Image (spheres, coloured by chain):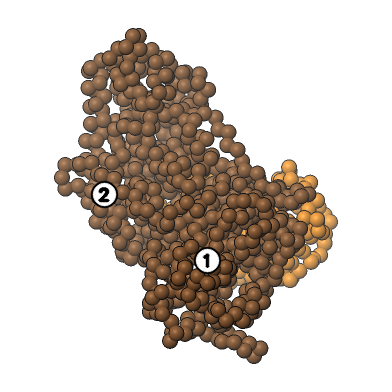
Chain colours: A orange, B brown
Amino acid sequence: MATAGRRSGTRRLRVGVVKFASCDGCQLTLLDLEDELLAIAERFDIVEFPEATSRRSAGPFDVLLVEGSVSTEEQLEELLRLRRETTTLVTIGACATAGGIQAIRNWSEPGPWAAAVYPRPELVSSLAMATPVADHVIVDAELRGCPIDPGQLLELLTALVVGRRPQLPDESVCAECKRRSATCVVVAAGVACLGPVTRTGCGALCPVFGRGCYGCFGPRGGANVTSLVANAPGFDDDLVSARFAGFTAWAEPFRSVIDGHGGPPGAAPAPTAGDAPARGGRP
Amino acid sequence: MVIGATIARNVPRWLPAADLGRLLDALRADGRTIIGPTVRNDAIVLDEILTDADLPAGRGAEAAPGRYRLTRRDDGRRFDHAVGPMSWKRWTFPPRAPIRVGRRTATGVRFTSSEPRPTPLAFIGVRACELTALEIQDTIMLDGQAIDRDYRARRSSAFVVAVECATPTSTCFCTSMGSGPEVSAGFDVALTELDDGFVVRVGSPAGARLIDALDLPPADGSAIDAAAGVVAGAREAMGTPLDMSDVRVALAAAPEHPGWAAVAERCLSCTNCTLVCPTCFCTSVVQRSDLDGTTSTSERTWDSCFADGFAKVAGGSFRPHVQDRYRQWLTHKFSTWWDQFGSSGCVGCGRCIAWCPVGIDVRQELGVIAGVGPLPLPRTAIAPLPAASVGRPVAELTAPALGGFVTAHVDGSTRETGDTMTLHLRTTDRTLLSGRPGQFVMAALPAFSAAPISVSRFRRDGLDLTIRAAGPATRAMAALDRGSTIGLRGPLGHGWPVGELAGRDVVIVAGGIGLAPLRPLIDACLAQREELGAVRIYLGARTPADRLYVDEIGRLAGRTDIELKETVDRAGADWFGRVGIVTQLFDRATWDGRNAVAFICGPERMMQATADVLSELGIDAERTWVTLERNMSCGVGLCGHCQLGRFFVCKDGPVMSLATLGPAFTTEGL
């Protein structure tokens, strides 16, 4: 990654936190680092953080944490501007890194949905697809997850201060399951679990509680989804696409599994009177 | 035989089922935490046992490839189940262990090794396959050149109560690996469970003391017969063993077998097989630092040769494909483990089969790739194969503790190229100063991961490190200036055979930064110049700006008693030297390769091409030496990162002759 790192003793890094289409949960993780907040404030000059302060600032930023997918024209323009003003751009969370849950709409025509949900759909203006930030600008580092892991956020901030590479392992959730002595839910209970193809970072949160992983942190490098679906227990029903159509549905190779299994569940809403014309579909 | 009031050690005793709690109490009274089988989350796992009631009475388990299920039993037996997902390594070799703390202080960087202070443990319910697994990990961690102190502390204080296996499952194949089912060694006390109690055997003085204190009566003949029947039944249940007598050789000969690609189609590279394996020992070091980078802790964590980053260096992964990793794992377990540790790495516990989410069965893969099938005759004991010695004698190797970084002072630095610096370091550490040409050190700064760096000069009062700023850690090191400090651990590995050169012609070929580990060799050749024949040095670099030690090389080029030629891959108008590849520099007409020894360092493909040309010129594999780059981490053969076929590059290399390396030098993805 391009680094904005400075050795200790030099000026504080100017940090911004911004959001596009998202729930704010990931930026709130920064406020959840309660024990370290003072140390963070000493080391970082947080000049833009709407969730924490009404103080606003313009760039340039040494570090910009970007939450949310790009879902509107305005967001896209804003993102391009911010990238020009930023040294190290870090995407945080499943929306920014993979498109988020809202990217499931990428499989549908937006018109009927808007008409089904909003009384005046003509006021809704959005891009045809909700897309990850990296589809539009160069991203220097990413924190995965829905929401991101506080430990990984702290690791990223620490690495930025010291000027080293953050340790964000691209290994399976299984590795963390085993280190935590969690019993494999696939083998011991036949539960469908995306852990073998999903990047770790959550600390194997769901399997520890007997649930299958549903892929919040998105696919890991080299994820063999084909074999998982064909050979692992739990994928022998008609819910295969539903299992992959979660927070990171739009990330490959999860997206291809969904495509190969009839698209995400839930067809477009039943047509209603006064449907707005579609604003484009999949390219 | 009864001598006085005590019963001889070899007389089996009887422990009534209801009295098992007394055994547990006695272990606890000894200050031990008891670890044993207990039911948790759909499996029988190994965890702390507070009372007899924590043991899985009346529970069993059955397993198949990719499948494990708890079962109910009609009896109240507590140990009558096949092995679960956890092995005892969870307790002897925990998934996370602190190894050192690094600090920046007013006087420089300081590294402090973590001191293991484990609670003494007692294991209850250890199977024969598990005892063999513990023995195998003992060999790795305690019998090699380097001792894992954390492992030693945990293992040496553990009291082992073995329990004979009664009900193996379909994934069990200890009889094929010669590791069970009978408990025969490596225990303090061994139990055989019957419905109404346990036949108790003593396996050590500590076990004898414990059993004497419990004042148990001798077991009667029918109980002893029943106990023998339990083990015989377990053996019978596993059916005909597999014939593993040829697997070591067959796998070593099968690196190009199409079966690797086929299994890689199914393999998820999820790491489960390696993490449930009771003998797998690969680890990585994770750094955690505080926000101002003054204090950092280094923690050793379980890792796996299936993980994406496991064999990565700055230029990419040495095992980019899943088939490379599966081949590494299976070949290591059943073949190269013999070369490294004198035994198989598999004990036949079957965990890798049961806990593979897609049910890959190593027995089947061995059948496809190595022709392993059932033993044709009634089973006879498989004689262990002799351990093959790897590399050269290891007398010169010292193995500092994993946390043991010595602080060295930066006296100055020299810029070599745009991204490469030579640090001139001063130290009084005798071990570091005893290093030999070709050896390397692990270099560390607090908060950064340690990096393997070959020593580019040994001096009486210190050493030089030539560091290319390829990543954040090496960038921080290259930026160190006079007066700063750095942590060093070493010297590590085998160096160049400088003592064997008298009367020989010497050929030295370097590509790019590959000159760094060769520079101490050049120093050594110059120091014994009169004893050598011709000395020829050939240097290649990408561009003129990428040449190292330019002034020094210029002076060498002026000497009449050595031949030194340089070339670059490409150059601008200001370069008056040669352009081309380094092998074009060889003056074939004046050479007699038959008396020459060659030393090569550079990118792997350059070394291969150079070795081919040298071979044509009469320098055979025994006299061609290379030094290899891998992602060395522990530097002493304990972390597994730098494996290359049967070698640990860190301790068997990094300098090796092509004769020793054999096909490992050219096999892709090894």
Q: Which is in the foreground here, disc 2 or disc 1?
A: 2
Q: Of helix, strand and loop, which one carries label 1? A: strand
- Place of residue B389 in the rendered image (x, y in percent of width and height, measured from the top left): 37, 53
Query: What separation in Å lies between label 2 and label 1 (alpha carbons)?
Result: 36 Å
Chain name for mark 2: B
Label 1 neighbourhood size at 10 Å, few (<14), some (14-19), many (20+)?
Answer: few
Number of numbered callouts drawn:
2
Q: Is residue B275 left or right of residue A96?
A: left
Q: Is residue A140 above or below residue B182?
A: below
Task: Give the label on residue B316, or none.
Answer: 1
Amino acid tagged 1: Gly
Q: Is residue A161 left or right of residue B670?
A: right
- Place of residue B570 in the rendered image (x, y in percent of width and height, measured from the top left): 58, 84
Q: Residue furthest front?
A: B530
Which residue is rendered at x = 30% and y = 12% of the image? B2
Which residue is rendered at x = 39% and y = 39% of the image? B135
Can residue B493 be seen by looking at this rendering?
yes
Can residue A68 be seen by looking at this rendering?
no
The residue closer to the viewer here, A20 or B265, is: B265
The residue at which mark 2 appears reads as B244
Label 2 neighbourhood size at 10 Å, few (<14), some (14-19), many (20+)?
Answer: many
Have a look at marks 2 and 1 and say if they share a chain: yes
Q: Is residue B413 left or right of residue B230?
A: right
Quarter-of-image position of residue B457: bottom right
- Place of residue B649 in the rendered image (x, y in percent of width and height, measured from the top left): 47, 58
Q: Residue furthest left?
A: B377
Chain name for mark 1: B
